[in-house]
Amino acid sequence: MKLSSVLLIDKNVFSKPAKIAVVGTGTYNEQGKTNTGRDFDGYTISCVARRNDTLKVKVPKENNSALISQITDALLDGSGEVFVSFSNLKLKAYAMLVEDNRVLSGVSAKADSFQIVAIQEVDEDDDIDF
């Protein structure tokens, strides 16, 4: 069986695909290009996946800068949790042989667009006392 024949759907990767928790944002460049700060190809949204893993979902630069700024501001001030949903999410399994014959495997993700589902304030009464 080839990895290309593995069917991945959002329910395999995210516990709640309609409301995915975000832990960070960034930018990316296509392979071979260097990131010079203002010159980049798109944004990445780091999300919580199953088993507390993180997955970076690539989204295009066009029409997303205001939403990315809104997510970044909410995460930086630490006042709330951000949840998003993606449109036309494409998931792909990969595996490659790296130095010293180890196999590196994972899932890559790309979406056409996204929307912010909620920015929920963190209730400080939910802290765990030790």
Image: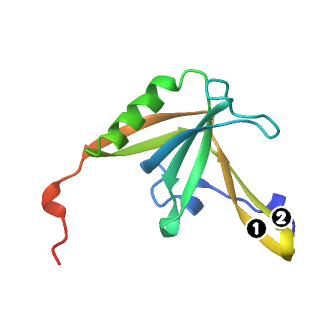
Q: Residue furthest bottom?
A: 130
- The label on residue 104 is 1
Where residue 82 appears, x then y in whole percent? 37, 44
Mark 2 residue type:
Met
The residue located at (29%, 46%) in the rendering is 78
**Can residue 88 be seen by looking at this rendering?**
no
Nearest to N terminus: mark 2 or mark 1: 2
Q: Secondary structure at mark 2?
A: strand
The residue located at (47%, 32%) in the rendering is 68
Q: Residue furthest front?
A: 36
Determine the CA span between mark 2 and mark 1. 5 Å
Image height check: is 121 above or below 27?
below
Query: Looking at the rendering, which quadrant does residue 7 occupy?
Result: bottom right
Where residue 87 appears, x then y in whole percent? 57, 37
Query: Looking at the rendering, which quadrant does residue 1 occupy?
Result: bottom right
Query: Looking at the rendering, which quadrant does residue 105 occupy?
Result: bottom right
- Say if mark 2 contacts mark 1, CB within 8 Å: yes
